[in-house]
Amino acid sequence: MSASNHPLLKEGVAKIGSCHTLAELEALRVDFLGKNGALTKELKQLGTIAPDERRTQGQVLNGVRETLEGLIAQKKAVFETQELAARLEAERVDVTLPCRPALQGKKHLFTQIFEDLSAYFRAKGFQIMSGPEVDDDFHNFGALNMPAHHPARQMQDTLYLKDAPGFLLRTHTSTMQSRTFETVGVPVRALSLGSVFRNDAVDATHTPLFHQIEVFVVEPGITVAHLKHFLLDLLSYLFKIDLCAAAEREEPLPVRLRPSFFPFTEPSLEVDCCCARTNGELKLDLSGNWLEILGCGMIHPNVFKNCGLSTFADGSPLQGFAAGLGVERIAMLKYGITDIRQFYEGDARWLSHYGAN
Ligand code: DAH
């Protein structure tokens, strides 16, 4: 018998002809040519027959195998081409369609305020400092003239770290005073912006995380007069009004300095602005309400002492002022935002309204 009229070949050719899918073809290949396939079984039988017959039978069976393998490969190539054509058709991309609008990220109000004030202060020779949000008792309290058991500590609703005694989440960026005195020394002009933490419940005006700006100048001969000019200049910049010129003309100012108390400044002051909102814009003018905007004062001599500083290099006494501003407070005032939670919600509509490119 020749390979061409072997029953397995006839059966195989007929079955290959009626295969409709790659999976069917593969099942058929296994049926005939797989480990336990019909043809494989016959090939295995060859060992049991007489050598003469084995040779001729072997040639016939190998002929059948080669023909079936060739036909299967051909059919497989046809199926693969069809499948590719079908996929290309189904997954067709219309490159002429307009693309989806890309959402453009914008700078959060805080970033805008940070960048704006950094530029303002850099131009005046201030260095921008940053420090840890997890700080120790000394930098947050002790160095700032609030020794253990000082009553002022209690006002800060401190979050202490359970597993790290002596460490806490900083309650104010005034920590950067002692950190800067230690690393940079004096004289110094520095600014620090960052997150602070207090154990406050969340409502329209409180969140456990908020942001502060600490700014201070320690230079020979610095007095309250410098602090006052510094404040008028800063508020003029923030609210786009020339308070220094108005002060020179001895006009009544929409800004007042009020005596206050902070353990790390002496004297201590709070600054109020008189402001009114007209046409959605905040203006400093005498027709509005007085609102507290920042705390400041002349740095207490104990703060220098606690940081190991005694005099300037030329022996003159250490003098300087410091001020602390709440970033949320400034943003709420400037942009007429009444609920502090909006800053943290990450609402894309809010961001696209208040954000800047
Ligand atoms: N650290 C103060 C607070 O968080 C704010 C402050 C007040 C900072 C007076 C100062 C300052 O530098 O002089 O309430």
Image (tube, helix red, strand yellow):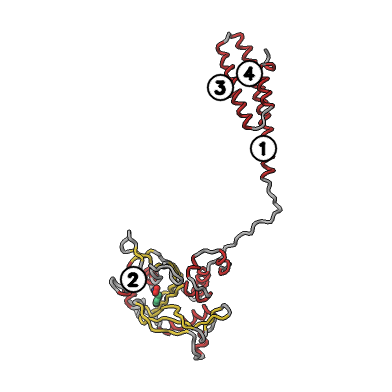
In the rendered view, would you say 61 is above or below 223?
above
Disc 2 and disc 4: Cα gap in Å? 92 Å
- Please give left or right for residue 310 compared with residue 53 in the image: left
In the rendered view, would you say 325 is above or below 287?
above
Between label 3 and label 2, give the one nearer the viewer.
Answer: 3
The quarter of the rendered structure image containing the N terminus is top right
Disc 3 and disc 1: Cα gap in Å? 29 Å
Query: Tag 2 or tag 3, which sits nearer the N-term?
Result: 3
Residue with the most extreme right position: 96
The answer to the question of whether label 2 and label 4 lie on touching residues, with beta carbons closer than 8 A, is no
Q: Which residue is mark 3?
A: 36
- Please give left or right for residue 274 compared with residue 80 in the image: left
Amino acid marked by disc 1: Glu
Query: Tag 4 or tag 1, which sits nearer the N-term?
Result: 4
Q: Is mark 2 within 8 Å of ligand 1?
A: no
Mark 3 neighbour density, 10 Å: few (under 14) some (14–19) many (20 or more):
few
Q: Which residue is mark 4?
A: 62
Disc 3 and disc 2: Cα gap in Å? 83 Å
